[in-house]
């Protein structure tokens, strides 16, 4: 009978079904496992004992028995003879997270985050704290580490792009959005985000200390890149208003005034062509926004853009 019970408990651990039990069934399972361990723990081999300790740890956390959960965490550590283990690091982080000590939970994982499962928890814990300015570098490091292990995770690439954008690392943000587009080429919202980050990169360039020549060259390249990203977004989804708004704003950038007034750029065929194309896009995007949003006047358009 004990072997049947053991297999039942190990199956519950491997499937994780216990995590979705009602409080009453969870309590019953806790007592069943406890009674089994009191009578049979001495007969288990090290691997099974480890698994049963792990199951008890989970059940104790889920039933808010934090003190007892710490006891089983220590027993698992004893079984490992104090050796480093990412499994143990994950369990420790879960314990400290359960007792509302996220900083310690993060430290447990940060010590040696060299496994996919641990990096996922590190990423999740960092995300919860990313609004705290001092934790943003940790969050970015966690996302990058996770992506080294799981490079095809487009959701994480997008999250990393958003995080880079939030701290003004626009070039890195664009790279992340393009990683998403390599796998999902029809993701028009990613083209929009890339265009937006490029637009902010242009504003940063204009506010910086670049030489006139560098500003004209890089500014034109950045604006064109941003403009084309917005246009690609609306090419994929013609009714995507945000894409048209992006195209409208970037094609009306103050940089174009500087470019027109730049004597060294005057008469250059590529510059003249770029200015003419961008002016047409500005008018086209204005018309599309007004049509999509049922706007009738320039005043209504301005009010809409200010929302």
Image: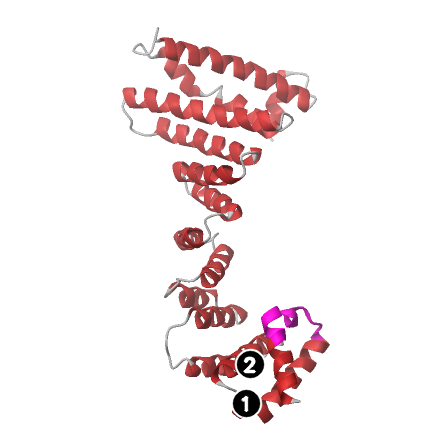
Q: Is residue 189 above or below residue 289?
A: below
Observer able to see residue 8: yes
SS label for mark 1 = helix
Q: Residue visible at 69% across and 71% down?
A: 21
Image mark for residue 300? none
Image location (x, y in percent) of residue 87: 46, 70
Q: Is the image coloured rainbow, by chain, by secondary structure, or in one colour? A: secondary structure
Magenta-colored span: 11-23
- Mark 2 highlights which residue? 52
Q: What is the crowding at mark 2: few (fewer than 14 residues within 10 Å), some, or many (at least 20)? A: many
Q: Residue visible at 63% across and 19% down?
A: 288
Image location (x, y in percent) of residue 60: 59, 78
Q: Is residue 244 above or below residue 6?
A: above
* Marks 1 and 2 in Cβ contact (< 8 Å): yes
- Of the numbered discs 1 and 2, the one sitting upstream in the chain is 1
User: What predominant SS class does the magenta segment belong to?
Assistant: helix
Can you say which quadrant of the picture contains the N terminus? bottom right
Tell me which corner region of the image, top left, top right, bottom left or bottom right, holds residue 244.
top right
19 sits to left or right of 200: right
Q: Nearer the viewer, residue 164 or 80?
A: 80
Image location (x, y in percent) of residue 44: 53, 87
Image location (x, y in percent) of residue 305: 59, 26
Q: Is residue 53 above or below residue 92?
A: below
281 sits to left or right of 210: right
SS label for mark 2 = helix
Q: Does the magenta-highlighted stretch encompass residue 247?
A: no
307 sits to left or right of 218: right
- Mark 1 highlights which residue? 41
Q: Is residue 15 above or below residue 147?
A: below
Can you say which quadrant of the picture contains the C terminus? top right
C-alpha span from label 1 to label 2: 9 Å
Q: Residue visible at 59% across and 18% down?
A: 286
């Amino acid at each position: 009978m004990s072997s049947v019970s053991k297999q039942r408990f190990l199956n519950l651990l491997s499937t994780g079904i216990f995590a979705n039990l009602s409080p009453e069934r969870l309590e019953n399972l806790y007592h069943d496992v406890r009674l089994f361990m009191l009578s049979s723990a001495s007969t288990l081999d090290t691997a099974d004992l480890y698994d049963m300790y792990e199951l008890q740890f989970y059940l104790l956390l889920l039933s808010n028995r934090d003190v007892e959960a710490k006891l089983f965490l220590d027993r698992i550590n004893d079984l490992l003879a104090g050796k480093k283990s990412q499994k143990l690091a994950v369990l420790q982080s879960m314990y400290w997270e359960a007792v509302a000590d996220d900083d310690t939970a993060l430290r447990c994982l940060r010590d040696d985050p060299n496994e996919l499962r641990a990096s996922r928890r590190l990423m999740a814990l960092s995300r919860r704290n990313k609004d705290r300015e001092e934790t943003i570098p940790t969050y970015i490091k966690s996302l990058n580490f996770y992506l080294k292990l799981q490079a095809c995770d487009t959701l994480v690439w997008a999250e990393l792009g958003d995080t880079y954008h939030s701290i003004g690392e626009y070039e890195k943000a664009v790279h992340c959005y393009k990683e998403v587009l390599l796998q999902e080429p029809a993701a028009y919202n990613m083209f929009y985000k890339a265009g937006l980050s490029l637009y902010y990169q242009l504003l940063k360039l204009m506010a910086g200390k670049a030489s006139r020549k560098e500003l004209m060259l890089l500014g034109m390249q950045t604006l064109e890149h941003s403009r084309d990203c917005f246009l690609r977004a609306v090419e994929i989804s013609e009714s995507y208003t945000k894409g048209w708004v992006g195209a409208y704003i970037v094609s009306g950038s103050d940089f174009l005034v500087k470019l027109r007034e730049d004597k060294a750029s005057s008469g250059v065929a590529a510059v003249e062509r770029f200015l003419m194309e961008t002016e047409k896009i500005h008018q086209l995007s204005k018309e599309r926004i007004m049509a999509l949003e049922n706007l009738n006047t320039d005043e209504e358009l301005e009010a809409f853009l200010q929302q």
